[in-house]
Amino acid sequence: AEFPCTLPAVVARRAGVAPDAPVVGLEAALAALDAVVEGRIPGSKVLTLIGADGRAVRNYRVALGTQIKEVLEHAGVTLAERDKVIAGGPMRGFAQYSLEGVVDAGVDALTLVAAADVVEWTPDPCINCGVCIDACPLRLQVQLITRYAEFDLFDEARKLQIDACVECGLCASVCTAKRPLLQLIRLAKRELEKAG
């Protein structure tokens, strides 16, 4: 069986086209059109600021390379101590350790997370509850894949179809032991890609 390895492949399949068909976002398509027709390379990005309540606050057009703190200042956002900013959405985004990080072409949103809602990951072992498997839309054996990743047994993770993971983050959001499942999956995929 063939499995999608990225979210665009799932979108393509749902649209009734081949899973390897290219899926391009509207903003990227319009930027490509501008590049071809106008000879203009895009220098800005549209992103959505998402409040700590999970609702979109506002959309902004931001120059590429703008520091995240500048976007927040412009929006009038003041973060409390230990509040977090995620570049991207809450499930697939990347926590920012510094607000001096910049907006690049891959940042579609800035998501604010209140300190009380920040998940503290633990190094605790998996308790084999199976909740991550139930949450996985592809029913992957997440608990085994991530343990293999944790102990650098990346080839074993591949045998359990880690490449099929769409990195939705649902497994990590329900993990009883609060293990960093998505980060372990991303680590294993990166190491497998480097190994060839």
Image: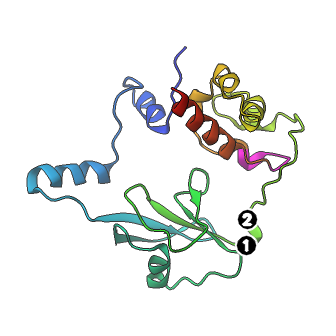
Q: CA distance from mark 1 to mark 2?
A: 5 Å
Where disc 2 sits, the SS reads loop
Can you name the residue that lies furthest to the top here?
1
Residue 54 falls left or right of residue 6: right
The N terminus - image quarter: top right
User: Residue 134: x, y in percent?
Assistant: 75, 33
Q: Quadrant of residue 103?
A: bottom left
133 or 73, which is in the foreground? 73
Count all numbered tags in the image, as a single digit.
2
Q: Are marks 1 and 2 in contact (CB under 8 Å)?
A: yes
- Say what amino acid the circle numbered 2 marks: Val
User: Residue 145: x, y in percent?
Assistant: 72, 30
95 or 174, which is in the foreground? 95
Q: Is residue 97 above or below residue 138?
A: below
Query: In percent of the image, x 9 and y 57: which residue is there?
Result: 38
Please tell me whether residue 136 belongs to the stretch shown in magenta.
no
Q: Is residue 92 above or below residue 192?
A: below
Residue 17 has which mark?
A: none
Q: Is residue 190 above or below residue 183?
A: above
Residue 85 falls left or right of residue 39: right
- Say what amino acid the circle numbered 1 marks: Ala
Q: Quadrant of residue 165?
A: top right
Query: In percent of the image, x 30 and y 50: which residue is there?
Result: 28
Look at the image and give the residue range highlighted in magenta. 172-178
User: Residue 7: x, y in percent?
Assistant: 49, 38
Query: What residue is shown with label 2?
Result: 118
Residue 115 has which mark?
A: 1
Can you name the residue that lies furthest to the front here?
195
**Colour scheme of the picture:** rainbow
User: Residue 150: x, y in percent?
Assistant: 75, 38
Residue 162 falls left or right of residue 4: right
Residue 182 falls left or right of residue 4: right
